[in-house]
Amino acid sequence: MFGISRVVKRIEEEKSLDQISEPVSKVVSKLTDPDAIKYLLSGSWLGHQLHPMLTDLPIGAWMMASTLDMTGGKKMQPASQRLVALGILSSIPTAMTGASDWADSYGKERRVGMAHILGNVWGTAFQTLSWVARKNDRHKLGAGLSLLGLGFTGSAAYLGGHLTLDMGVGVSHAAFEQRTKKWTDVAAEEDVQEGQLIRVTANKTPVVLTRHKGELRALSATCVHAGGPLDKGRIEGDCIVCPWHHSKFRISDGSPMRGPAAANQPSWEIRAQEGRVLVKAAN
């Protein structure tokens, strides 16, 4: 195991981080709880998590600023100062979306996420000091502070990659489902009642069935966000609400209507035939 991997493993097990992360996550959860805010910050409206896209803005701006510091000379000092400012400004929505996603994590994922947050806070702080130094014509000091900030930001980015690629945070839990494209008998029609959720299996894939406004409907039963069982959730309006983190999916097509889920919940074609309910993966 590489040295950096050992450090990350220690972060995963560092329970002292819970003393910081638990109260912070409670505050963030309260602030981001309204449906409209969660929908916006999670990227549910986009069909893709918003935070990973936004991270390119501050990191890219700060890297470009440091590149100009090293290669552009005095004539590029105004440009590098503006890039530092751009990175600071763009870090605000980046942090907001990341905090919203992080608030719905637990255990090891939350600890690594807390370290990720702290690294980014320090990185942004040094970039802010860099901008102040540049504003006061201390460009060499500003350049040094920017490099120091990039060190913290780069470390935080590594932890962000670990969260996604090694721990699976943000990866759709339906990504590897083997959804059959053949009509499959899964239940008796009389068992699917209006407003009720029942779990069935289609070729080893769990599916949740319901009857909504008289129509039979089917979605994959494993929530794309964190694997929650949708059949244990509830129907609210035209949506199924996940029991774990309260993501909402439109019953008719699986569209995410509230975060933290951003991806579509896979929908299934469904029909009744001779008293039986059959499903197959939607095209």
Image (spheres, rainbow, N blue to C red):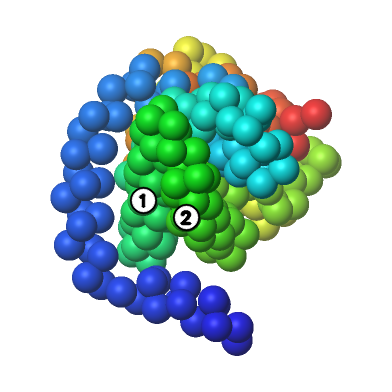
User: Label 1 amino acid?
Assistant: Trp
Residue at 49% in and 51% down = 144
On the image, which quarter does residue 137 sit in?
Answer: top left
Residue 170: horizontal and vertical position, in percent? 54, 47
Which residue appears at 47% of the width and 55% of the height?
148
Residue 5 found in image quarter: bottom right
Query: Would you call the spot at circle 2 few (<14 residues within 10 Å), some (14-19), or many (20 or more)?
Result: some
Q: Is residue 148 above or below residue 63?
A: below
Can you identify the residue that label 1 sits on? 122
Mark 1: few/some/many CA within 10 Å (<14, 14-19, 20+): some
Question: In the picture, which quadrant includes the N terminus?
Answer: bottom right
Q: Position of residue 190 (x, y in %)?
A: 51, 32
**Mark 1 touches mark 2? (CB < 8 Å):** no
Disc 1 and disc 2: Cα gap in Å? 9 Å
**Residue 64 visible to an observer of this rendering:** no
Label disc, if present, on residue 148 of the rendered structure: 2
Q: Secondary structure at mark 1?
A: helix
Pick whichever of labels 1 and 2 is earlier in the sequence. 1
Q: Residue furthest bottom?
A: 1
Q: Nearer the viewer, residue 8 or 121?
A: 121
Q: Can residue 134 be seen at all in this image of the molecule?
A: yes
